[in-house]
Image: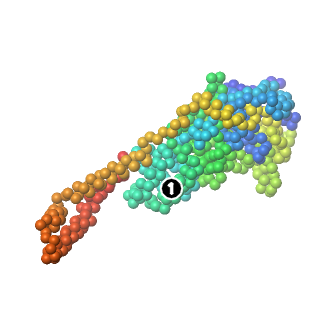
Amino acid sequence: MAPPERNPRVTKDIFIGGGGTDYATQQFLNIGYANRHGLIAGATGTGKTVTLQILAEGFAAEGVPVFLSDVKGDLSGLAKSGSADHKLHGAFTSRAETIGFSEFSYDAFPVTFWDLYGQQGHPVRTTVSEMGPLLLSQLLGLSEAQEGILNIAFRVADEDGLPLLDLKDLQALLVWIGENAKELALRYGNVSASSVGTIQRRLLVLENQGAAELFGEPALALSDLMRRDADGRGVINILAADQLMGAPKLYATFLLWLLSELFEELPEIGDPEKPKLVFFFDEAHLLFDDAPKALVDKVEQVARLIRSKGVGVYFITQNPADVPEDILGQLGNRVQHALRAFTARDRRELRMAAETYRENPRFDTEEAIREVGVGEAVTSFLQKKGVPGIVERTLIRPPSSQLGPISAGERAALMAQSAMAGKYDQRLDRNSAFEILRARAEKAAIEAAKAEEEAEQTSTPALREFSNARRYAGKGVSRSTSRAPRRKAQEGFGAAVANVVIKELKGTTGRRIVRGILGGLFKGR
């Protein structure tokens, strides 16, 4: 019998494990269809992390860069070779023999560590402008009206040449918007002071969560996530997310921003021989929990179109039901670990998960998903012409890299040797909205002081008379009690003149002068 026809573009498919009821049928992820996205699902403790690890190894070995988040801190072991001294070495070699994995060996892979907080990896930053109002509104949990004001802020920043780089830029611009709400309302619509205040409070909460470290420069260059080492292997980019999970909205929004940036910046390349980058989105339910429809629509759009730019997206979550149906339908490569069914809802979700697979006449898919053990899964991968493969029970192959985290010293040494060392470590603070608005305020204050001084020396008749009266009152006046009525009359005259000046300044001309002084405080570009 002739072997099945292979995609002529494929260099080498990624071995996943042994399939079939007797585990004799080997399962491969066709790398030519790896950009058609995928799903890794299963209850806690069923082996999702190891599946993610072996997929990352497989892509890296084929020269495909990988980006993944390390939620539990276990995936740093990708940077270090496994060892025969490991307590599971015997189990690994036994499983490799069972599933016919004759090429099994231990190996380390090129890794770059990243961290939004700059502690366990190189700092990762973006600017407020790059994040955009939609994602920032989701991050802040804003209402529709508050999101509208945020959109006004971004529009004003664009039109007035005010770069929004970090949080203090946005905070300063919101102060300006609040102070000029009446003028802005004529052009953009109502600007509520209470809504501006709410946004400022949300920004403060975000800042207290450490998000100030995310926004700024130098911003992350996407090309730094798509590198290969000297041997042609893809670099595995690991985002330290154990601390970041304390701010789940920040975590989900950052990953979605990164995915959106890839979608916006990468060129169309059709269906490549293999992906340019594979993106793993762990704890994917955080992205969709309470997400507005506009955000879900954006994720669906990105998932549908980004494959033609050579990027494969793999969602990792506990239950397939965590992913909206429209997005789930686009995930062609699937690894389903065990699901537990303790309640009626669990059983419905288990049934729905089983119905998404192409049936295998040898076993019941629903029963298999419930019964597979740790390190075992129900799998289905795209075959020729993108047709979903028949579902199989699969023993997942053992990893070649270390199972479990590396030490803090080993991580620090790898960071020091990294090609990214020093590139993002020093934070930049160039001239942006905060500095520009502050400079305008300082200039306006100087102009106001100068105008006040000039106003005191103005030559209007009323002021000349006022000045002469004051000089007259100070010269040649006897201090005797007999002159007291005259002094009182002079003081009364001086007060009357002062009232005339104040009244004049309160009039149309005076208001024009004041506006001329202060109007330059927040001029446009």
Front residue of 316 and 366: 316
- Height in image: 221 above or below 329? above
Asked whether the viewer can see residue 39, the reply is no
Q: Splitting the image into 4 quarters, where does residue 19 fall?
A: top right
Is 428 or 374 nearer to us in this picture? 428
Residue 30: image x %, image y %? 72, 31
Tell me: residue 214, above or below residue 270.
Answer: below
Q: Residue at x 55, y 50 (%)?
A: 207
Residue 417 at x, y percent in the picture: 61, 28
Tell which residue pokes out farthest to the front in this image. 480
Q: Tell me the quarter of the image containing the N terminus.
A: top right
Question: Farthest residue toward the top?
Answer: 231
Q: Please state if 373 lies on the left or on the right of 248 as rendered.
A: right
Residue found at the very far left of the displayed protein: 476
Q: Secondary structure at mark 1?
A: helix
Which corner quadrant of the image does residue 484 belong to?
A: bottom left
Please say whether residue 318 is visible from this viewpoint.
yes
Q: Which residue is more in the foreground, 387 or 394? A: 394
Residue at mark 1: 200
**Please, what is the three-letter code of the amino acid marked with disc 1?**
Gln
Q: Residues within 10 Å of mark 1 (few under 14, many from 20)?
A: some
- What residue do we see at 52% from left, 37% from top? 426
Which colouring convention does the figure follow? Answer: rainbow
In the picture provided, is 215 more to the left or to the right than 38? left
The residue sitting at 80% across, 39% down in the picture is 375
Q: Position of residue 132 (x, y in %)?
A: 52, 47
Image side of residue 444 versus residue 193, left or right: left
Q: Nearer the viewer, residue 115 or 409?
A: 409
